[in-house]
Image (cartoon, rainbow, N blue to C red):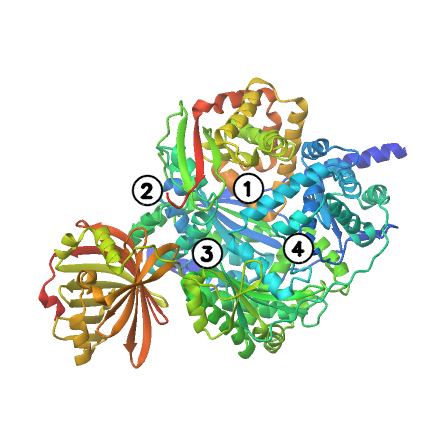
Amino acid sequence: MKNCLFTLATLVLIGYSANAQEVEFEEYDLDNGMHVILHQDNTAPVVITSVMYHVGAKDENPERTGFAHFFEHLLFEGTKNIDRGEWFNIVSSNGGSNNANTTDDRTYYYEVFPSNAVELGLWMESERLMHPIINQIGVDTQNEVVKEEKRLRVDNQPYGNLLAEIKKNIFFKHPYRWATIGSMDHLDAATLDEFQAFNKKFYVPNNAVLVVAGDIDKGKVKKMIKDYFGPIPKGPEVTRNLEKDEPITSTLKATAYDPNIQIPAIIGAYRTPPQKSKDSYILNMISSYLSGGKSSVLYKKLVDEKKMALAVQAVNISQEDYGTYALFALPLGEVKLETLLSEMDEEVAKIQTELISERDYQKLQNQFENQFVNSNSSIEGIAGSLATYYMLYDDVNLINNEIDIYRSITREDIMATAKKYLNPNQRLELEYLPKKDDK
Amino acid sequence: MKTYISVFLMVCFMAFGAQAQIDRSQPPKPGPAPKIDLKSPQEFTLSNGMKIMVVENHKLPRVSFNLTIDNKPTLDGNKHGVSSLLAAMLGNGTKTISKDDFNEEVDFLGATINFGASGGYASSLTKYSNRILELMADAAMNPLLVEEEFQKEKDKLLDNLKSEEKSVDAAAARVGDALSYGTQHPYGEFTTEETVNNITYGDVYAFYQKQFNPNNAYLVVVGDVNYKEVKAQIEKQFGKWKKSVVVDVTVPASQPNAQYAQINFVDMPNAVQSNISLRHNVDLKMSNPDYHAVLIANKILGGGFSSYLNMNLREKHGYTYGARSGIDSDKYVGQFSASTAVRNMVTDSSVVNIMMEINRIKTEPVSAEDLRNAKAKYVGDFVLALESPQTIARYALNIKLNDLPKDFYSTYLQKINAVTAEDVQRVANAYFKTENSRIVVVGKGSEVVENLEKTGIPILYFDKYANKVDKPVFSKPLPEGLTAQKVIGDYMAAIGGKEKAETVKSVHTSANVTIEGVPIPLKADIKTMSPNMESMEMSAEGMGVLMKQKFDGTAGYAEQQGQRKDLTAEEVAESKLKRSIFPELHYDAANISLESMVDIEGSETYKLKVSENGKDSYRYYDAESGLLKRVEATEEAEGQSVMTVVTYGNYSDVNGLQFPYSQSIVAGPQVINLNITNIKINDGVTEADFK
């Protein structure tokens, strides 16, 4: 009898912990086409209000690159009811924090507040969308700030231009070919009218998703959302017709120079399928296999055993329209860049010709399960995932079942995908070198 | 009629509807403050002295273990770096598990194990937590410390030191700590190639023996655990850890603060920004009754975006991306610091403004709004932090490590809210000691020291390892055989050739102008005509011409907001002698001399002195491109002499000649930026334009 009870208790416990991970959410559309996702979790008195807009660097005019990111700055300048310079004061004087970020695919804004200020967060985000002030003063100010940001984050950073160099050399037609931060000359040349037109085209409720997550009362919050966002008029539908790139069929070679580095880098970069595809998930797994952790294939061989590399990494930069898969290594001492690349190739070739071991396969499954659990550990993280899954994956349920995709991947899938995409004739070989004074 | 009524009703209804709508002109007021529920962890102590705190949280199926060994800081002397080496070697195997097997198993479980020199951290999914705890305990008590790994880590550490050699930030941190704590204090000593080379494998092993024991150890467990079960596991794994003999060490006293405010300058010729940090030591333990008031005072001074320092240095002056202050409460010795990184040219002004803002909080009562906002931000941060179960654990650990009263965190917000404007001013005077601070500036001496000297604050010089040195010589030797004429010749060649330059009779420049602190976008229309005619008109959109300056070769005037002032006879005489287009074409060899080689914004330039009409000015030509980079002249204005510095950039081609498309003019406190939009040569300018 005692034993039976014990088993029952364990069962209940298992049921409980399985449920504990489920992120419950509710989603609906406002009349103006704005999508809304609510997630209620009353365990801590914290709330996040966030809006993701489906506009990124890829939506820019090729002669005006950097617009999307510039806009992210501009939309903190003030609104009809929030005076210039007041945005940050309102947030911090109510005990909150806020930020925003821009990628090639989308732009994301959010505030985190103690939960009694949820209405304030909604008011601020609706102000930003409804009637931001876009004037010459704001444009001029943010022009300087963005330039400082570029100096700090890109031009003064060792390896800061690496990604831009990769993109430039593997995309030729698709707008992923330019850097998200864009060109300062383009921003200098832009007129106020152009900024206003950009706002009108992309900052419309039907191109956005609002997420409210945390310690909320759903009924009250729904009413507030209707009050604050309901009156914002719907805009014309945003359509995209981005040019596609032809597949790479013979090896591309490029060289770039960086004045901030002393150690060169070698990169092998492949153009891969969009992030929604199963192949993209498989490539994430291949990255972990190659360079995730001290026991990974490349780290163990090149850094630890052979002492040929100071650092080595395989990354899958997955995006909405394409992915970029990159092998990256910094040589130690006199090791030649081509030697490093061929050492890495040797390991990729093994994945293409032999199944990875059962134990390595199980290791990958464990690592992805761990990642999955941790990805839902904060309200901020959950809100970001909900918005992303809705906007870029068309499936909010992925927040709870993305792990099933990884579970469905077999060792054979890994071999097939490596064979399909990671061949030397499908890639760019980039030598990223220290810039000497005389160059 | 009926229709009318219904329309009327409709209107009423709509009006009513509109009224019922929210008022969006004001920020919505927050609801009642959320209730804060501060839980306490469950605790127990092992017989070897190790204390354990457990925070059960079942939201996610994961567990973390955090080990802190609270030993007193020790002096490593000429073997500094021994703790970094130990940290790198720990967590890579145990006496019974090889390094490869250990790392493979941790990765296999999808888990993390890291060690530092005084603790470690491990985390995993619940289902693997027992094994991870076992591995962590084994790695802490029976680490695999072998000679081969020691050598590997030593080489890596030496490589890292090399890669940091040119880092301004690394030098600033090192010198700052060394000077303020003193190199005979654990917080002030630092690692060099020499100290690393002194370390032997035996030193690392001995350091481990001394540091890693359970006497002062705390293990914090957070996550999906059952208290009883995890307690049993911990007793099993850590219970066998042997207590060591307690050797009581005394922490040496830190160096006393400076007797007078001083700049401690470190020259790094590769710096593109100056790293400034004003600092001095303070005695501020967390248990000090002033603690909460000091936190608020620091928040207002430099604890965030809207603080005095950031508003001044970033928002008002645009010197930097950010300026902050911090106060570090430490149970041995704390520190106050105010720091920023600024472009070379404004280093001296930044120092002056930092001092000014600190003096402001000491002398002026803080406004009710600033005080309220600072408190609100503290309260908010406190509430937001509660989302993470780690917070509860951190608070409990802090209480133990710092001997705080049990209610320290439950009364925290109450104490923050009780801070008054008088408290802020009082503690600012007691804890922000500008008069005893060292202002550590690491930057490019050749560009910043001359102006730093003008601040009147005494400057002491140090090398990047905090050794006192004599004032270095900053300018560089000139290349052999170079003359002033050659520099001018190179300049003429670089802009497109002397012949071509001589064909220019008039230049018409249009520019967008920004003046720091003036929020109105301005436009300038500048015309010049040989030999000496000049005209400038400044206008703002919708406001017309705001300012005019004209000289037609015989007379001139300045007009501002309807007020006209004619040039004096003396000014006319001077203007007549000026050459408005390419003055280099007209220099008399006897009046120019080559002074020195100077770095400006990262490029080498030749400094030329031009003496004309009894006045000296300085012109800087880029050594590489030959182009004019900067002009410095001193002008008399209203009885005061003001130095004007014009920096040129963005050279571009206009009809085969190079013209600078950006000009930045710094005149005294004013900074004016010209962004040139169009230049026309010999096109449309007539003598009438100068009347």
- Residue contact at pointers 3 and 4, CB within 8 angstroms: no
Name the secondary structure under disc 3.
loop
**Image location of residue B231, percent across then percent down:** 83, 45
Q: What is the spatial separation of the Cα atoms under label 4 and label 1, in whole angstroms?
A: 21 Å
Discs 1, 3: same chain? no
Give left or right: position of B625 versus B309: left
Q: What is the spatial separation of the Cα atoms under label 3 and label 2, in whole angstroms?
A: 37 Å
Q: What is the spatial separation of the Cα atoms under label 1 and label 2, in whole angstroms?
A: 28 Å
In this view, the residue farthest toward the left is B687
The residue under label 3 is: B271
Name the secondary structure under disc 1.
helix
Q: What is the spatial separation of the Cα atoms under label 2 and label 4, in whole angstroms?
A: 44 Å
The residue under label 2 is: A61
Residue at image x 68%, y 25%?
A: A359
Name the secondary structure under disc 4.
loop
Residue at image x 43%, y 73%?
A: B454
User: Counting residues from the N terminus, which is met first, the one under dot 3 or under dot 4?
Assistant: 3
Residue A15 vs residue B258, the one in the foreground: B258
Whether residue B120 is visible here, answered yes or no, is: yes
Q: What is the spatial separation of the Cα atoms under label 1 and label 3, in whole angstroms?
A: 41 Å
Give left or right: position of A373 versus B509: right
The residue under label 1 is: A385
- Residue B386 - label: 4
Q: Mark 1 is on which residue type?
A: Ser
